[in-house]
Amino acid sequence: MKSAFSAQYLRNVVFFILACFFLFPVLSCTSTKTTTSTIPLAYTDDQRTKIAILGEILYESKDRIGYVGLLKAARNLYPDCDYVIDIMIDQRVTTTTETKNFFLRNFQSVTTDITWIMRGTAIKYVR
């Protein structure tokens, strides 16, 4: 009687492990996010290339920013923008020092806020 119980128990354990082994790939989730960014491969400053100046772009962010972010901002403002030239990058750092007095002791806390500012000129190639 004892061996029949242990054999049934062992069979159940093996069945459970095999079920988990085969169901794990089926029940596991995979998520894929694909983003496509269109940026120009090269800019030419050849005198013979005709360009139209669309306007100035100003882009600010709390995160570090790069050319692709500036180009996206330019394309939001000017949909036919091909490139951004004459780019300037500034960083505005704001440091706040707060002093608290508590039982004749001073406690200071310093917070720093950084803002990245990019500006440039949006252009499009005249074809």
Image (spheres, helix red, strand yellow):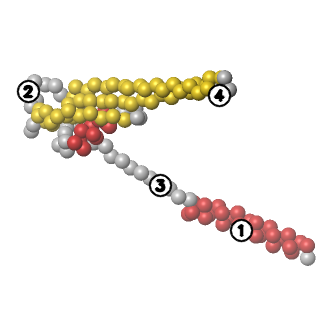
Q: CA distance from mark 4 to mark 3?
A: 52 Å
Q: CA distance from mark 1 to mark 4?
A: 66 Å
- The quadrant of the image that shows the C terminus is top left
Q: Which residue is mark 4?
A: 102
Work out whether residue 41 can be spotted. no
User: Identity of the amino acid at label 2?
Assistant: Arg
Q: Nearer the viewer, mark 1 or mark 2?
A: 2
Q: Which residue is mark 1?
A: 15
Q: Assess whether mark 2 and mark 4 are in contact (beta carbons under 8 angstroms).
A: no
Q: Which residue is mark 2?
A: 48
Q: Write the residue at 43% across / 26% down.
A: 94
User: Identity of the amino acid at label 1?
Assistant: Phe
The residue nearer to you, when weighing 5 against 71, is: 71
Relative image position of residue 21 (x, y in whole percent): 64, 61
Quadrant hosting residue 54: top left
Quadrant hosting residue 41: top left
Q: CA distance from mark 1 to mark 2?
A: 76 Å
Relative image position of residue 65 (x, y in whole percent): 36, 33
Q: Earlier in the sequence, mark 1 or mark 2?
A: 1
Q: Is residue 31 above or below residue 5?
A: above
Q: Assess whether mark 2 and mark 1 are in contact (beta carbons under 8 angstroms).
A: no
Q: Please indicate whether residue 113 sits to the left or right of residue 22 in the image.
A: left
Question: In the image, which disc is placed on residue 31?
Answer: 3
Relative image position of residue 42 (x, y in whole percent): 23, 31
Q: Residues within 10 Å of mark 3 (few under 14, many from 20)?
A: few
- The quadrant of the image that shows the N terminus is bottom right
